[in-house]
Amino acid sequence: MVFFGPCKRFAFAPLTVAGDHLMRSSVSSILLAATLAAGSAYAAPPAASGKAAAPAALGATTKDDLASGDAAKVRAALDDVRMGGTANASLAPVVADLLQRGLTAPITLAAIETLGDLESETASPVLATYAQHRNLKVRQAAIRALLKTRGPAATRALRRGLSDADPMIRGLSATGLGAQKAKDALPDLLLALDHRVNEATAAIGQLCGPAECDALTAKLGKLPLDVVTSGLDQAFFRADVGEESRLKVIAKLRELSTAEAGKYLRDVQRRATTATPRVKQAMEQALSAMPGGAQ
């Protein structure tokens, strides 16, 4: 049996394992009394409201099962916790402790996925450790969970993930840093883009200040247009991006002077309904000079 613990990649360490729907009774009172005497209980079903019923609160039995060391009980308890989603976030430290102590491979993945569904930041430190695990599936699961748990530990792990050997992890890490507004990661994202982590462009566009936005604009003509514009689109329509940055994008697209660039700029023009007069004029002038741009 294989056990997983919070070890880093290629570091091996021995680790230990740590009803039915209630229905309204329509029978007579005599039958009901007899049924109750026989040990069966009935109650009225919840009134139909069009909304899914809230998950039942998990009690001490679930915690006991999680700590039991019995693989079947632990797995069933994890499933119960996960089904409740964020309503069971208070159990995140219990599940994180299981991971810290070590579990079998299948239960490790189940525990990581459960922590992701609980979306508790308290789980990020142990997930960050598993994001460096030697097993690829474990690393991928940990990164996906960190996208939901967030926090400083998650951000640090995602920054490391930009240089992972697996392209999926690199891409998820870049996407996560953008979603988590990790502006401190901009240098790492720009470096990742230089190493063809194309998902970094959208994150850069979400986060960039003037200098980083200009650096992204400078990639036009060096990287495929659709890769760069996935980030420029994010930046161009941000309210906090200045007019000068937008004008530089327009000028660079005009400099490219390709039909593809003209098509993209025409699309931007249609969507930029609140652009300043200078930006509108720059787009008109650029489009009139580009192949297929004028209409």
Image: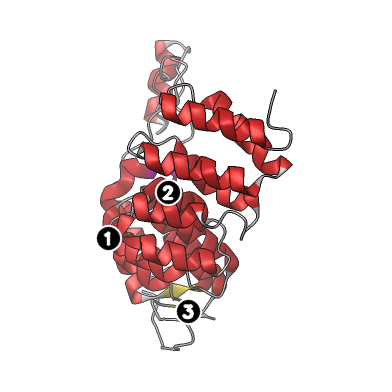
The answer to whether residue 40 is seen in the rendering is yes
Q: Of label 1 and label 3, which has the lower sequence position?
A: 3
Image quadrant occupied by the C terminus:
top right
State which region is magenta: 81-85
Measure how far apart labels 1 and 3 are at the Cα level.
28 Å
| Left or right, residue 189 beside residue 185 | right
Q: Is 123 in the magenta? A: no
| Residue type at numbered disc 1 | Pro
**Which residue carries the number 2 mark?**
82
**Badge 3: residue crowd in 10 Å (few <14, some 14–19, many ≥20):** some
- Image quarter for residue 168? bottom right
Measure how far apart labels 1 and 2 are at the Cα level.
24 Å
Main secondary-structure element of the magenta-colored stretch: helix
Image quadrant occupied by the N terminus:
bottom right
**Which residue carries the number 1 mark?**
152
Give how far across and how far down residue 204 sits, in percent: 44, 53
| Residue type at numbered disc 2 | Arg
